[in-house]
Image (spheres, coloured by chain):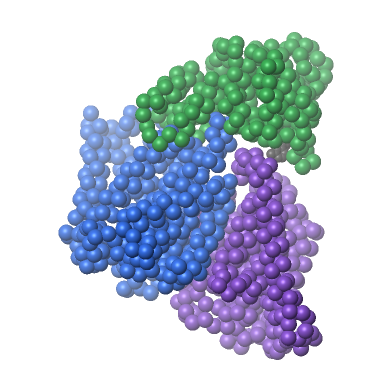
Chain colours: A purple, B green, C blue
Amino acid sequence: MASQQVTTRRIAPGLKARIAPTLAVVLGALGLLGVLWQAFGAGFGEKGNVPTFILITLNGLTLAGLLFITASGLTLIFGLLRVTNLAHGALFLLGGYLGLTFIQKGVPWLLAALLAMLATGVVGLVMHQLFLRWNQGQDLRQALITIALSLILADQMLAHFGATPTAIVPPDFLASPTNLGVYSLAYPTFRLAMLVGALVVGLLFWLVIKRTRVGMVMRAGVDDSAMTSALGINVQLVFAGAFFVGSALAGLGGVFAGTSYSLAPGQDQAFLVYALVVVILGGMGSLGGAALGALLYGLVDQYSSAYLPAAYANLSALLTFVLLALVLAVRPTGLFGKTR
Amino acid sequence: MSEHVLQARGLTRRFGGVVAVREVDLEIGQGERRAVLGPNGAGKSSLFNLLAGADTPTAGSIELFGTDVTALGARQRTRMGLSRTFQTSRLLGGLTVEDNLYLAAIGVSGGRFRLLRGSRDAEARKRAVRVAESVGMTDRLGEPAGELSHGEQRQLEIGLALVAEPRLLLLDEPAAGLSRAERQLLTALLLGLERDVTLLIIEHDMDVALTVAERVTMMYEGAVIVEGTPAEIRSNQRVHDLYLGRAHV
Amino acid sequence: MNEGWMSRALSLGGRGALAVVLAVVALVPVLCSTFFTSQVGLTSLSLGIVAVSLTFLSGYGGMVSLAQTALFGVAGLITAKLTVDAGWNGWVAALVGVLAATAVGVLFGAISSGSVGIYFLVITLAFAEITYFFFAAVPTFGAHEGINQAKPPAPLGDPVLHPSAMYYFMLVVSVLVFLGLRYVSRTAFGLALQGVRDDPVRMAALGYNVRLHRTLGFALAAPVAGIAGVLSTWSNTRISAGSISLAVAILVLTAAVIGGLNKLAGAWVGAFVYTICDTYMRGWTDRFATYLGVVFLVIVLVSPGGIVGVLTSAGTWLRRRVGAGDVPGAGTSGRPGPLAEPATPVPVTGGQSA
Ligand SMILES: Nc1ncnc2c1ncn2[C@@H]1O[C@H](COP(=O)(O)OP(=O)(O)OP(=O)(O)O)[C@@H](O)[C@H]1O
Ligand SMILES: [Mg+2]
């Protein structure tokens, strides 16, 4: 990659380098103006569009929370191991189904979520130890391996959990909606908890990155040999730990998604793609980037499906990818990606 | 046109906190044979990368054959008549020796996008074979470059630079890892180069470097510390302290 | 010499086997049922062509693309739209469809040409998703319903009831695509593309525009994927957004990997193996996808050269064994050195190609 950048950087000439960002910023600003006009154009009264706007914004924010939890695992693994785990979506769905199973067996929600995280983490760890560890550095081969594993996992989940969409019942204390206190609005408490969960995960990560040597390595985005000297002999342990934690986060995302949305075959690929978009938007390996990417994705997704003119409403699924293309046109390595 | 083939002013390259190249001024005249010496990590290869366009300087400017090329890439500089070798061989491992040389030939002469094979290839192929002969690889033409021995890879590395018939040749440690006999062959090859080729060579091997070069530039910690004839360099106290005094290959 | 005779016999045997395979392939409509010809024959040929556009990119350009099905879909859907809704002549519609796929390919190629390896894979995945969502959303192209009754031009007959004309047509196209791509790989452009695959920095130092070469390589593979899209539309008489979902893109990758990601012939081998399993294995197992995944995994782990890679190394090994058995201590071809060692598996990218 390093050498690749050398050729890439020079080819973007000055003119193109200026047109693309301007275009992207103008488009973004126009979109935002459109949303705000629709939200506040009819005034701030009860009859206006502000209450809907608040709900849609909350939908976007809580979706962003879920996406961040899922994507942070992906970006953690990439940041340390340079492995793009394309089985991340399968681990996500596995976490959801395991959580569901535990809860159906009578385990309380919180404990079930924890157990599901542990189990997914272990599955991810086994995957890494058995299939990926000895391929370190062959990124394409590792990606193919994880694709194969995701095919197997997805089919096995279909066999064990069936094709009917199912949802996890939220814990009792989060089951009833929260009163927001404005416009007499109420919002599902569990979704708000999801946002809090994302903040907690983000905070823990931030501490690890700021305070530990592992975090330093992740920030620097260094290569294998430099990492060995920075971390001493424990590189393999750190790698295994990263895979465990990253996979466990995918599992946690699955439990959250299963509780606030639903679990069904196909969710694995859908959320893998969401997480990839989020991670690329922010810059692979950057945690702050993942947070910003998740926020952008969540809001653009929700606003576009609510505010696009009716004739174009069915294009909303496209829009997040257009966002991705716009960002990559301006910054080929994502918002916070290292131009190495 | 300036009388200098290559002229660098205030060339600086930072990698984070490391200053790999520090305000280097360099002037190479037509037909000159110049050696760049310096201990490991002195910034010689980094300087080469800047000169060849494989890397962009943090500050400073480069003039090649009288034209400012600071903003141009490796591709354009190669087309202008600059060829370089890499310190660790960068060969097209999946292609045969002949195809490596052939691609190097059409890289500067045109026909890179041709989708038909035909008689127009013959000239480039002939040149490839001729250069293979001059670097002693005639019997390896059909071998994939990835399967060559280390010495052969170094030979091909030089061959790739020569096929382009450059006016300025940058060689980064061409003798590294070569046997004694191979070094002598290399020295002979370099001495046999025509005078319209200007030569800039990084070399740890003093025999090769000081036999070939007429002037020497000495680098240390990114900066040029001395410049002079081989004799001046040999007798320079600072050079002795820094470099020649140490155990070396 | 005895040894030379043996190895010649073996290579003759290899060629003989190849000839038998080709003869059987050519006789499929005669020997096999209509169901087999249409279900297995037509499907594996169109899957093989789209897979070879990926194999070409990956084997010669080092670009493992997930966007080939998107280009397949652009050509297929436009052809179907023009023939069914606008009443165009099928050949003209197909030409327009393939040209459109090429144009989209140039665009995709230009955007992704700055990325390599896994970044390239992920960016092309985004292209696949964009194209899928676009066709799934736009009513002009039938949205999720797709376009039905997209029949091939009259000379190709009815692909379901009488598939042999269609089969031979697709077989001829396959052979032409194979020969064409193999020819290109030996031209200046093709060699330079392989050079870019092996070392982009070196190629830039030799005077090449690396991004342009990558873009053009991508553009060259695009009409191949487009042709596959048209042929698939014709042989199924329909196409929809579902035909180019991410699952299908991964399926094409799977077939290409199983056959061998760095030999052109591997695309058709993988496509055939996949199609035949898809057609018959589903009858006795519900866990077809698991078995497929396991085969995929084993191949990536054990033999990155795929089935074709295994066959090639087996052939080489056999030839060496026989040669060594005849004349102790001597290699078969008289060349010195490393030939005595067993062939090492070819890495997923790089290495020599067909
Ligand atoms: N891509 C890079 N990123 C960070 N630091 C670099 C990079 N390339 C070189 N350096 C640093 O720049 C300094 C000069 O390196 P360079 O390779 O130019 O030295 P050199 O004189 O060629 O040494 P040698 O004789 O070992 O080849 C070294 O400290 C090296 O660590
Ligand atoms: Mg060096």
Residue C233: x and y, percent? Answer: 35, 62
Q: Give the image quarter of residue A37.
A: bottom right
Q: Residue at x 77, y 25 (%)?
A: B9
In the depicted structure, whether residue A52 falls above or below residue A83: below
In the depicted structure, whether residue C144 falls above or below residue C120: below
Residues C117 and A139: in front is C117
**Side of A280 where B109 appears, left or right:** left
**Side of B164 where B245 appears, left or right:** right
Q: Is residue C322 visible?
A: yes
Residue A190: x and y, percent? Answer: 69, 82
Q: Residue at x 56, y 56 (%)?
A: C122
Q: Is residue A134 visible?
A: no
In the depicted structure, whether residue C35 falls above or below residue B126: below
Q: Quadrant of the C terminus of chain B?
A: top right
Residues B66 and A91: in front is B66
Residue A182: x and y, percent? Answer: 79, 85
Residue C163: x and y, percent? Answer: 23, 62
**Side of B134 where C325 appears, left or right:** left
In the depicted structure, whether residue A255 falls above or below residue A19: below
Q: Give the image quarter of residue C140.
A: bottom left
Q: Residue at x 63, y 56 (%)?
A: A326
Q: Residue at x 47, y 33 (%)?
A: B112
Total label count? Answer: 0
Residues A254 and A325: in front is A325
Residues A156 and B122: in front is B122
